[in-house]
Image (spheres, rainbow, N blue to C red):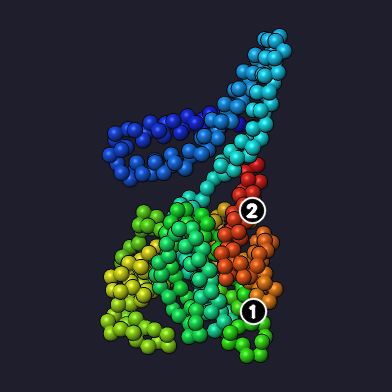
Amino acid sequence: MRDKLEKLILAYQELEKKLSDPSVVSDQKEYARLAKEHASQADLVAAAREYLSALDDIEAAKEMLRDTSDADEKEMLQEDISANEEKLPQLEEDIKFMLIPGDPNDEKDTIVEIRAGVGGDEAGIFAGDLFKMYERFIASKGWKTEILSSSPSDSGGFKTIEFKVTGDKVYSVMKYESGVHRVQRIPKTESQGRIQTSTATVAVLPEADEIDIQIDPTELRIDTYCASGPGGQCVNTTYSAVRITHLPTNTVVQSQDQRSQIQNREVCMQMLRARLYEQELEKQQAELGAERQSQIGHGNRSEKIRTYNQPQDRVTDHRIGFNSTYNAVLLGDGLSSVIEALAAADRAEKLAQQV
């Protein structure tokens, strides 16, 4: 442990030297990358220094204890040893958690897609309720929501809606929401008072830039058309809506909610980069095999992750067996407690694998 922490501190000191190097300072991109790395390691290095300092103080006190015969001094030294030894277990636990390799995408903004599943009109209404839930949660975190594309449902809610979330470490939090969400309740459209089960699929994609994904323009088919509203009626007379098809993968994205064809095209490219990046991540995860799949929040769209049961006022996250209330999570601000429990379980699982 000591050797590992000493090497960590030395590497951090080298990083600090690089940040003061004029050649690095003049390269804005490299400086920003190193500054980000420096900031991300600050807490770990501080804990490592405190841990090593406590070990050194214990050794120094023990050596002084052997050399003294004064009763008062012995008592004082023994108290110092005990105080430092009490700190070590918690510091060691904190350092172990900090040493868990982070997801390289955790710092990224995200593109979230909600798609109505089985359940007809009620599935669309449920998709709309999930969007409202996320809007409240995102606002509570001080993040921003930008709707990229949407297809409203005739009975309310959405057939699909895609939106971008920007803020501090958005993906590290939102990634736990990928999967199939199921609701059990009496629909507004149900006259007999029968409980219906409906689903919606949520996909959380880390936003990819041109450095992450390079797209050959010759591999794209770009179509323009009139933006339409509910029921398919044309809502404007200009061809402002855009559909882009990535021919090698047959990935299709479209946007009609922006004011101009140029804006819709840019939104489509954002979504396309995110989709292609997701496909690349899925390939990498498949290569890692069962170990990666066992981790919480791996983003499998087909996995049923949560059930919202209105009659029983219960929400159950099936990955960790966590329970909360329907009114708190879907209608209130209780999503934070669910995600915090998932993040804690994920960290514990990764720590166990590391050990």
> Foreground: 250 or 306?
306
Q: x%, y% of residue 299? A: 55, 62
To which residue does mark 2 refer? 345
* Viewer can see residue 299: yes
Q: Residue at x 39, y 70 (%)?
A: 148
Q: Nearer the viewer, mark 1 or mark 2?
A: 1
Question: Callout 1: few (<14), some (14-19), or many (20+) C-alpha neighbours within 10 Å?
Answer: some
Label 1 and label 2: CA atoms lie apart by: 29 Å
Mark 1: secondary structure? strand
Q: x%, y% of residue 219? A: 34, 67
For badge 1, the amino acid type reads Arg
Q: Residue at x 57, y 26 (%)?
A: 53
> Foreground: 75 or 199?
75
Q: Residue at x 34, y 41 (%)?
A: 31
Mark 1 or mark 2: name the one nearer the start of the chain. Answer: 1
Q: Please, is residue 348 above or below residue 273 in the view?
A: above
To which residue does mark 1 refer? 185
Q: x%, y% of residue 254? A: 38, 74
Mark 2: secondary structure? helix
133 displayed left or right of 147 = right
Q: Which residue is most to the front? A: 72
Task: Please state, as top left, top right, bottom left or bottom right, where the N terminus lies in the image.
Answer: top right
| Mark seen at residue 47 | none
Q: Please, is residue 310 above or below residue 27 in the view?
A: below
Question: Callout 2: few (<14), some (14-19), or many (20+) C-alpha neighbours within 10 Å?
Answer: some
> Foreground: 43 or 318?
43
Q: x%, y% of residue 159? A: 49, 79
For badge 2, the amino acid type reads Ala
Q: Where on the picture, by quarter, is residue 307? A: bottom right
Q: Residue at x 56, y 31 (%)?
A: 50
89 displayed left or right of 208 = right
* Viewer can see residue 289: no
